[in-house]
Amino acid sequence: MLVSLFLFSFFIHSYRAALPTPLSDVQAKQADDFSGIHAYNEYLTHFIAPHSANTRENGIMRDWLASVTTGLQQEALDKGLKLDVIGHDDSKDIIKQDWYTPNEQWYVESRNVMVRLHGQSDKEGALLVNAHYDSVPTSNGVTDNGMGVVTTIELLRYFIQNPPRHTIIFLLNNFEEGGLLGAKSFIQHPWYASVKLFINLEGAGAGGRAIMFRSSNLNAVKKLAQSNAAFKHASPLGNDMFKAQLLKSDTDYSVFTENGIPGLDIAFYAPRSHYHTPLDNLAHTTPEALQYMGQMALGAVKSIANSDDLLDTSNEQESFIYYDILGRFMFAYSFTVYQYLNFLALLFVPIVAVYMSISRNKDHQSVRSVLKKNALLTLQGLIAAFFAFIIIILFTVLAVFIMVKINPSMSYGDVYGAALYTFVSVFLGLQLSQLLLPKKLKQTLTSTNAAWYGLISFWWILVVCSSIAGFKGIAALYFAVHLLVFNSLACLLHLLLPATKKFRSPLIYFLQTIVPFTLLLELDFLVMDAMRHSTADGTPELAVYILIALPLILIGMHFLPWVFAAGNQRKVTVSATIAFLFLFSICSALQPFNGFWSPNKLLFKQEYNFGDALSTVTIMTATGIKATLKSALPPHEYDTLRCEPFKTFLTSCKYETDLLPKYASNSTLNEFVISEVKKVCDESYCRSSATYSTKNSLMCRVYFDPKENEGPIQHAWINDKEIKVDNISALISYVDKYQQPVEFKVQYPIHSKEPKASLTCFYDEWTQLEIPAFTNLRDNLPGNTVLLIRGQGLATVNYGNITL
């Protein structure tokens, strides 16, 4: 049985991971499908350099996208379609953020590229297809989010050739990395008022499959499930993981849903070790992966934009069940239906059990006696099942806790080895639990159907728990009803088929496990792919092991009746112990990091006070940081290294370096220029203003340190944009052009002390040695380690303080 489980697992893994063949333009037109080859060759190949919001490459990318969409506009006009393009958005918005400090106020000049293809119905109401085009500074952004961008462009191209019934807005937004600012800017744009529903295309891995991992509109998900997309991948686990804060990143989905629009979140998710790193490049993705996202997105957009009920979409954020089986079949239904299914299973399984007990009364005992006898057997079996469940959990937690202590991050480097080790722990825990049972109870379990009855009762209780979770909007236990139903059917077959029947046991085992094991293995592989590299972001490794273990524990519970049917429990336990010790010795020696699939991710940030001889570099990760830095840093830098825990599960190290940011290291370059402060007062208030500009940064900050000021700033302006709030900790500007003057102004009571502020700019260009501390460390790191940053500010330069 275990051999069949491993073979079945291999099949599930291989079949679910299959990618579609990418289609050429001609093939796509013939099949009415997405052209992955055209999107890859014509569009994705432009993503060859980092293009974060605070770089010149970002402007080049914006101009290229504007050029492409303008070219498609002409094609649409030639076909008599109405297509609006805003290639250079002139929006200037004030956006509240808590990115660097709480209560920041950002002045953002939009670089969003927007396209609106008017539908044939000429009615108000639009579907929004959104993808951000900026990358982080340390990545070419091919999967995050070049794949989403080129999918969006290819969808635009498709719908120009196949005009939709309803209007579609295609938003290519900028500055998602570092606060979701592009989406926050768009919700203030006039076009946003017409949006009824959105589809967000994202990337948090490097190729592979795209998954719909969040959604808030059942009707839209049903349309995707019923679409002609050949490959569909969806799971409600993403919603639950975000709620539990096990995933440490966010997408534009949150911005739109928080502002009243429901939608779908579709994203790549593995390997997360490449996410935001230099490995997110063309070499680590394929046209097949692009075809996967494209055909699924096309299926959703086509079904929604051509539907009768898009305009009737409500703003309600719905919770519901959705999942796929083997990437080919997708199901979506409401929590109401879910609870009905649970209720029917909870009702009919006991009814059938009572009926079978009475109808199989060959000794002509009273109904009461028969029911009492079977109730006693069920109770004994349930005790055995719960005892097994508890011992399995205790032994598995102990086994993974020891492994986490002996070989931290082993699951990061070899998650399949970690899963195999965990499953053997589960199986050994099952065997030990039954050996520890009283002898009389073991005899009952061996000679009767008590083990089956107890296992089904255990699944019945799990379905009750699933229903309770469902009332709280938790969908992760959607599989529970399938475990109850198929185990009950297997037990029914066990009762009805004569013991002498050929292939009886294989038939029973097949019926018991085919659907439950498919669902549980799919869930486990999803967890392994999505969570294995999340420890570098601060997710505790023990949590990753637990998420891997939960489906495996439920798989292990299926073997409870077969443990007693097989006999020789001591022999099986000895064999399981040997297998456990063998895997323990191997796993404890495995290296957690490698240069291919699982490089260690070090978060880099440099801070420099203008005019100083040294700057400070901060490096952060989960494990292995000191040994890595010792091999990479020169002695004079390593001697200044100091490390401390950060947010419980990460380690933060700082060291001093004389490799200074290029643009800020020479005062004669006049990189940052600020005017004299102008001050005007009346009877009640004073207003102080100044203007600054920078040659090589689009993003600067005026920070009001509460330790240096009497009270909070509550009234300010940036480039004449007024801000009135209870507390302004910082004014951050993001402008469209270099050396563009930024005027800031603050108002404060006339009798208060003059406010003090620090002036900081952020720098993210490094490919021409602009940040030598970054490139020097990158070049000296071992091959199994990569540098990255989240958001903006590889180098932060403090230009000094000002009294206003």
Image (spheres, helix red, strand yellow):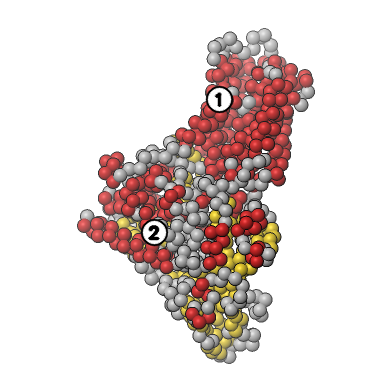
Callout 1 secondary element:
helix
The residue depicted at 43 percent of the width and 70 percent of the height is: 109
Q: Position of residue 12 (x, y in %)?
A: 50, 33
- Is 255 on the left-hand or right-hand side of 424? left
Q: Residue furthest front?
A: 635
Which label number is shown at residue 617? none
Whether residue 560 is situated above or below residue 760 in the rendered picture: above
- Using residue 83 as the reference point, say whether residue 532 is left or right of it: right
Can the viewer see residue 6?
yes
Q: Which residue is rendered at x = 62% and y = 27% of the image?
A: 558
Q: Secondary structure at mark 2?
A: strand
Q: Residue at x 30, y 52 (%)?
A: 157
- Label 2: which residue? 171
Amino acid carrying mark 1 in the image: Ser
- On the image, the x and y values in percent for residue 16 come to 47, 36
- Taking depth in this image into account, of 686 and 173 the one nearest to the observer is 173
Which badge, 2 or 1, is on the more N-terminal residue?
Answer: 1
Q: Using a 10 Å C-alpha cutoff, classify the residue at mark 2 as few (fewer than 14 neighbours), some (14 to 19) or many (20 or more).
A: many
Q: Nearer the viewer, residue 518 or 530?
A: 530
- Where is 271 relative to 671, above or below? above
Q: Position of residue 709 (x, y in %)?
A: 65, 79
Reading the image, the residue beneath label 1 is: 4
